[in-house]
Image (cartoon, helix red, strand yellow):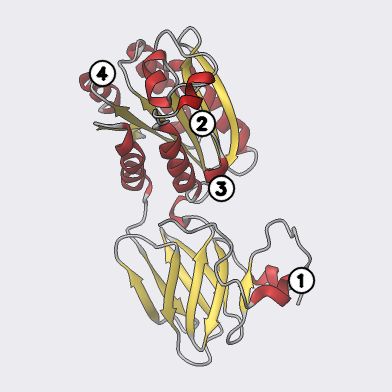
Amino acid sequence: MSHKHEQIVKPFSDVHNKGGHILATLLHDPTVEGLDVALYMDGSASMEDEYGPRGVLAKLGGVRNLVEPQMRWMLEYLATKDKDGVLRVAYWATGDGSAIEVVGDLNGTQAKEYKFPGPQFYGKGTVMLPVLRDYVAYLRQQMEKGAKRGLAVIITDSQVHDASDILAYSTQVAKEIQAGRLPRINFVLVGVGDQVDEEQMEKICHHEYPGVGHLWCHRIADRMEEMAELVAVLVDETMTVAAGGRILDDKGNVVKVYETRLPAVLEFNVPPGTTAFTLEVGGEKYTQPIPDEDEHWHRDEEDDHDDDEDDANAGFKPFSSGHGHHH
């Protein structure tokens, strides 16, 4: 059975057949094929209290790090959109206010294990242009690895010092997108708290660029605890290209319709003798052969364990893959 992982077609990670009742788990959201995501968290001095005390003071307890659980939640959620489930994560507005501290390329499935204590050097200002430069440079590298679309989520808790530079740079980025030198990019800007300048955010976000439309969108969260939820809403609104999708059997009959958006696990019934199903979404078609009854096909992650062992356990771990699930 060592051929079985070849039977799984992207974007699926798991396919079960229980007597014609199919459970198919998505590896990532197929409406955003080839998406590469980065998350930039404000590291300016005004954020210091939100991360809570460090060192000796942290041991006294009583003060929670409000940012860390939100960062973990966002990382896990955004990874379900990313083409390989790995996000570039960085603190921005650090040091003199224009520095960036890259945390690393983090795997969304391990989100709960990461610590986000805040940047090494809290910033003395909030300069955003370096974030855009950093993301565009990163995306250019990722294009060589198949990135077809970009999404940068930027969190801030204060007024930005370089709004005019951001607009000028956005104009350049839009030209590059229109010329085909950069893929389509969305910048999602989320402000947190009462120090945010909403008028300034609107000025940045309402700008439309020829042939590209809007590059930016924004929302404001009153409290740090609402941040992740808002990011998810905004990303869904911005990134869901297709309004749902549908499943066809091998004769072209529609067996299931998803009106608004696809869940992580698709569940539907096919007529007896059906050998494959097709997911139609966003103008694309993905045809997946159906395993024999009660069999379970699972995409090996880089074939990291040997097949025989995998087969022996296959029946016992229906949804152990961990990716594609977002609750």
The residue at the point 36 percent across, 56 percent down is 242
- Determine the secondary structure under disc 2: loop
Circle on res. 195:
4
Query: Disc 1 marks which residue?
Result: 309
Tell which circle, 2 or 3, labels the residue nearer the N-terminal end: 3
Q: Is residue 210 visible?
A: no
* Mark 2 nearby-residue class (10 Å; few <14, some 14–19, many ≥20): some
Expressed as whole percent of the image width and height from the top left, the position of residue 248 reads 43, 77
Res 252 quadrant in image = bottom left
Identify which residue, 194 or 93, lies in the foreground: 194
Query: Disc 3 marks which residue?
Result: 85
Q: Quadrant of the C terminus?
A: bottom left
Identify which residue, 303 or 244, lies in the foreground: 303
Disc 4 and disc 2: Cα gap in Å? 22 Å
Q: Which amino acid is tagged 4?
A: Gln
Mark 2 near mark 3, Cβ–Cβ under 8 Å?
A: no
Label 1 vs label 2, nearer the camera: 2
- Determine the secondary structure under disc 3: loop
Expressed as whole percent of the image width and height from the top left, the position of residue 283 reads 42, 60
* Mark 3 nearby-residue class (10 Å; few <14, some 14–19, many ≥20): many
* Mark 4 nearby-residue class (10 Å; few <14, some 14–19, many ≥20): few
Label 3 vs label 4, nearer the camera: 4
Q: Is residue 105 visible?
A: yes
Tell which circle, 4 or 2, labels the residue nearer the N-terminal end: 2
Residue 44, above or below 278? above
Q: Which amino acid is tagged 3?
A: Gly
Disc 1 and disc 4: Cα gap in Å? 55 Å
Circle on res. 116:
2
Mark 1 near mark 4, Cβ–Cβ under 8 Å?
A: no
Q: Which amino acid is tagged 1?
A: Glu
Mark 3 near mark 1, Cβ–Cβ under 8 Å?
A: no
Disc 3 and disc 4: Cα gap in Å? 33 Å
